[in-house]
Image (spheres, rainbow, N blue to C red):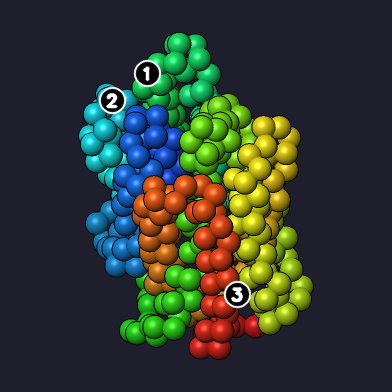
Amino acid sequence: MKHTDISLAWLLSLNFAKGVPYVVVMVISLLMFRQMGLCPAVVTLLVGLCYLPWVLKFWWKPYVERVLSVRQWVMVTQLLLSLLFSALAFAFPSVWLVAVLLVATAWVTAIHNVAADRLSAQTDKKSRHLLARELSRKFAVVVGQGVLVMLAGNLQVFYRNDMLYAWRLMFYLVAGLYLLMFFWHTFVLPAASSVSLNSSVAASLSLSIVLFFICYPLAQAMIAKVSILFLTATSSNGGLGLSPQEFGLVMGTVGIIALTVGGLWGTETVHRLGTERCLWPMALSMLVPGFVYTLLSYFQPRDLMIVSIAVLTEQLAYGFGFALYLWLLRQIVWRELGKSVMALSMMIGCMLSGVLLQFMGYNAFFVLMLGLGVLSPLSLLLLREIPIKE
């Protein structure tokens, strides 16, 4: 096998390994906690805590290579992930033990992702390597948000609606997958180079820039979590009543493909037209998800095709608009600190969304999010202070 083929093999598997735990912690846990009987406010609070490692990443990231090499961190964290997923399977039906283990899984996942990114960055910058990394990450989301959710749904049917047993079997499967990943990467991962992590951040960050990175994605961060609950909630509770299998197809497959296409479309648009010409059209596209879910919550269609088209539309628009945010994040001086502020926005949105939903219901919540979505274009007024590298 050629050296390039070997590089592609471990790049694909390593970047796939990055995505699945994140989806388990941030998406699957929402469905799981709801089936365990927790109210939306508690569910989003618990899941919101899992963003804390990414919020604090700018602080702990410089210490990663000081303890172990990035290759060693990849191996250690993959073994720990296998053990944590096994422990999660044993933890049922204790809600709080499951919650503690999920938070621990989030921390290990964040460290694994930092080490995996650092190791992947050692490869040359060939376009096929970059494409392989991106596609493998998206495939991991499809597997996690689509295949694993559908598998859990089928297991619930097979075991006569024994939901907890189905989740337990799913976690055993994921634990086995990461044990295999550990052994595979033991043989194929290259040695880490001695180049240190780039952890430099600016000494100060203005309040206006912090507000931009918080406000631009805030409404979408809230919609992202509540939309999962909305799609799977029963019609008597104001939702669309999708089964886990239907949710896996609609959001985990159709939605992820649309999100990927929208992101690529947005990135290409910024490259071709320049940042200044793209600011307002791309920011305004962030209003589409709130509009789509307001209509869905009002009319509550039962046709799966209509729901799929709606999700495709809002994910395509969201991917297009969020590409601008990610593009600006890559251009600024304080990239790592900006990523932490972005994670803080996601954390705040997640925690607030369940509380608002608890008091308002789905329809009123999405109407509020449609109004709150104007923060995305309005936050552009703060961009004059950001050093954009054209």
Q: Mark 1 — residue?
A: 165
The mark nearer the N terminus, 2 or 3, is 2
The mark nearer the N terminus, 1 or 3, is 1
Q: Residues within 10 Å of mark 3 (few under 14, many from 20)?
A: many
Up-down: is 349 above or below 311?
Answer: below
Q: Residues within 10 Å of mark 1 (few under 14, many from 20)?
A: some
Q: Residues within 10 Å of mark 2 (few under 14, many from 20)?
A: some
What separation in Å lies between label 1 and label 2 (alpha carbons)?
8 Å
The mark nearer the N terminus, 1 or 2, is 2
Which mark is drawn over residue 296? none
Q: Which secondary structure, mark 1?
A: helix
Which mark is drawn over residue 92? 2
Residue 287 position in % (x across, y down): 63, 63
Depth-wise, is mark 2 or mark 3 nearer the camera? 3
Up-down: is 340 above or below 294?
Answer: below
Q: Residue 167 versus residue 219: which sits nearer the camera?
A: 219
Q: Which secondary structure, mark 3?
A: helix
Quarter that holds the N terminus: top right
Q: Residue 84 versus residue 168: which sits nearer the camera?
A: 168
What separation in Å lies between label 2 and label 3 (alpha carbons)?
44 Å
Q: Mark 3 — residue?
A: 377
Residue 11 position in % (x across, y down): 54, 46
The amino acid pointed to by label 1 is Tyr
Left or right, 255 with respect to 15, comes to: right
Residue at coordinates 36% horizontally, 35% vertically from top-left?
33
Q: Which secondary structure, mark 2?
A: loop
What separation in Å lies between label 1 and label 3 (alpha carbons)?
45 Å
